[in-house]
Amino acid sequence: MPRKRIDSSMDWLPSRVYMHRGNYVYQPKSGGKIILCPLNAGKLAVLKRHEQEQGRVDNGVFFESIINEFYASDTFQELAVRTRKDYLAYGVVLSQVFGKMRPNVISQHHVFSFMEWRAKTAGMEQAKRTGNAYEPANQTANKNKACLQSMCSWALQRGKLKQNPCVGVKKLKTKARDRYINDFEYQAIYNVAPLPCRVAMEISYLCMARIGDVMRLTVREVRENGLYIEQGKTGKKQIKLWSDRLLAAIEAARNLPIKTSIKTMFLISKPNGSVYSIRAIQSQYADACIAAGVIDATFHDLKAKGVSDFEGTLADKQNAAGHTTAAQTATYDRKIKTVRVVK
């Protein structure tokens, strides 16, 4: 029999529901705390929410419900646009692996086994897509783990988990990418690539921009003094000043074939006016690399080529690329340096 409450006016509260730090909180026998409603909520709202949560606890909750609730949360909406898009993609795999598991059953060894499996499968997918030799995609596995850790941290703070199974699980070792695409290789790829891919290549290289930022460009971003680019990952806003080569790329974009009477807002658009997907341009680029005989060259390497070829100090390169730190810029500066010898 539950204890009598000190404040008799709160006798309407269900068993194991208490007031704590401005909220009504439910503490099920299975452990943890579940925030129901703020204290200013009405009785009906509190009782209804308690009934929902009690049913979830009694019937057992699968991890897929935590994934879905995380996506619907303010925490998720506050993330950068690019991060949200990546997390949605990672969530598909996470749901397939952990979706039907009870949240508190997931442990560190499950997370690490998933990371090893994901590194292998993502590596195979990448090798098939690019034609390069197979290598475990450890970075992809680490990003999936980071997404899972964010979901679990969110759930832990809301009493939906007893512990975060990702804490203490080390990242898989990754090797900093140092591939520099030289001018000859770039031209060879460019010569055999379809026109939409050529335009995307030029903008990515000249503006040191990620493919996602390039494909999101609209005709409104073509300004009088340059090309306006807002980075989806960092939110950095820049106007890339015009050069003859960048102007030529924009002109090529305007000459992309499009059906009569159709107007499009996208700078790099399909004939029907819709935007090309990132995967479509990456696929065109991968096919062009194979046709040109250039190996181990990703589209993202074009941004690194741009940073490497940009003349100036590391600080100049950082400012032009819109990076947050000089260390980040240094990872993109891949051209072999020439230095004087001892006299």
Image (cartoon, rainbow, N blue to C red):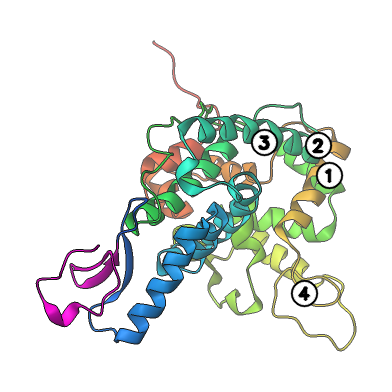
Q: Give the mark nearest the N terminus, 4 or 3.
A: 3
Tell me, yes or no, whether the two marked residues, 3 and 2, touch with CB atoms within 8 Å: no
Q: Nearer the viewer, mark 1 or mark 4?
A: 4
The residue positioned 55% from the left and 70% from the top of the image is 226
Q: Is residue 274 visible?
A: yes
Estimate the x, y position of residue 217 in percent, counting from the top left.
Answer: 63, 69
The residue positioned 45% from the left and 71% from the top of the image is 52
Q: Nearer the viewer, mark 3 or mark 2?
A: 2
- Of helix, strand and loop, which one carries label 3? loop
- In the image, which disc is placed on residue 128? 2
Q: Nearer the viewer, mark 1 or mark 3?
A: 1
In the displayed structure, does residue 295 sit left or right of residue 246? right
Q: Is residue 178 visible?
A: no
Going by the numbered disc 1, the residue's amino acid type is Ala
- In the image, which disc is placed on residue 262? none
- Residue carrying label 1: 288
Going by the numbered disc 3, the residue's amino acid type is Ile
The residue positioned 64% from the left and 75% from the top of the image is 218
Quadrant in which the C terminus is drawn: top left
Binning the other alpha carbons within 10 Å of mark 4 as few (below 14), some (14 to 19) or many (20 upward) gives some
Residue 14 on the magenta span: yes
Estimate the x, y position of residue 240 in percent, counting from the top left.
Answer: 52, 64
Estimate the x, y position of residue 263 in percent, counting from the top left.
Answer: 78, 85
Picture layout, residue 294 above or below residue 17: above
In the displayed structure, does residue 83 sit left or right of residue 11? right
- Residue carrying label 3: 181
Which of 199 and 63 lies nearest the eye of the viewer?
Answer: 63
